[in-house]
Amino acid sequence: MKVLLISDGHGDLARLEQIEPIAATADMVLFGGDFAAFGKPETGLPYLERLAHLHDRVFAVSGNCDEPAFRETMEEFDVSIEGSLSYFNGLMFSGSGGALKFTGVTPNERTDEDLVSDLHLVAESVPDGFSGSDEAWNNLVIIAHHPPKDTLLDTVTSGAHVGSPLIREFIEKWKPLLVLSGHIHESAAVDAIGPTRMVNPGSLAEGKYALAEISGGGKVPFEVSSLELKTL
């Protein structure tokens, strides 16, 4: 399966139009949050409308620039995986929206406990025979707008790591197949925690995205066979 990974659209409809031909070649699109432009929450809905028509299969979470109530609007468009579980082609999807409290000037800043609470259904849906410990959750895909702490995905310009400790703990415990994050524009990167492949594609509003190939399925374990950063 070919997966288009994008995040931080910030209301830029022109970039969505640019990436439409690439989306057409993908089996699914994952969006890491921030539909709206900074300080302009009203730009979120037009962006959501366009994103929902970009592909038949879109999985998304909200970002810190999106108002908390925007989650309900996303659910109306059948793209939200925040606080829920979705399934497609043998894969399980769950997501966490918003970002840690920092500037206080964006509408969807939350505590770390709130961020990880969006993923609570994962723990309630453990596959038969899954023991945890050193075993990877082979078909689990997570979208978390705020990246996990102490990775290549959460480093700001000063060099400080500003990621979520509890999202990292979640990844270490459940070992999902793939994690998509966003939020930190300057930290576009591919990284891993144990068997989990992770990506912050950077901001689509700046022309950045990523592509992944997921192989396997059925009796063959899923595998992220490629994961690459791209620029329009």
Image (cartoon, rainbow, N blue to C red):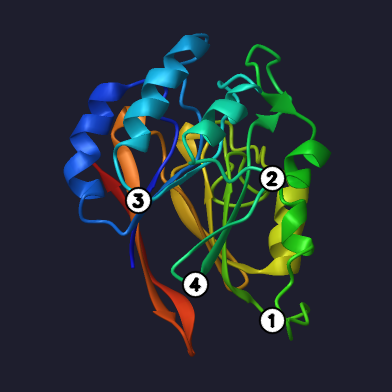
Question: Does 129 appear above or below 201?
Answer: below
CA separation in Å, label 1 and label 4: 18 Å
Circle 2 SS class? loop
Residue 102 pos. (x, y %): 71, 23
Question: Does 146 appear above or below 56?
Answer: above
Dot in front, 2 or 1: 2
**Residue appearing at x 56%, y 32% in the figure:** 62
Q: Residues within 10 Å of mark 1 (few under 14, many from 20)?
A: few
Q: Would you name the residue on which mark 4 appears?
A: 90
Q: Amino acid at mark 4?
A: Gly
**Residue appearing at x 46%, y 20% in the figure:** 44
Q: Residues within 10 Å of mark 2 (few under 14, many from 20)?
A: some
Outermost residue to the front:
76
Q: Would you name the residue on which mark 3 appears?
A: 210
Q: In the depicted view, which residue is nearer to us: 75 or 163?
A: 75
**Sequence order check, earlier mark of 3 and 2:** 2
The quarter of the picture where residue 63 lies is: top right
Quick check: marks 1 and 4 in contact, CB under 8 Å? no
Circle 1 SS class? loop
In the rendering, which numbered label is found on residue 83? Answer: 2
**Residue appearing at x 74%, y 86% in the figure:** 129
CA separation in Å, label 4 and label 2: 19 Å
Q: Amino acid at mark 3?
A: Ala
Q: Specify whether 107 is left or right of 184.
A: right
The quarter of the picture where residue 72 lies is: top right
Circle 4 SS class? loop
Q: In the depicted view, which residue is nearer to us: 191 or 62?
A: 62
Quick check: marks 4 and 3 in contact, CB under 8 Å? no
In the rendering, which numbered label is found on residue 157? Answer: none
**Sequence order check, earlier mark of 1 and 4:** 4
Q: Residues within 10 Å of mark 3 (few under 14, many from 20)?
A: many
Q: Would you name the residue on which mark 1 appears?
A: 135
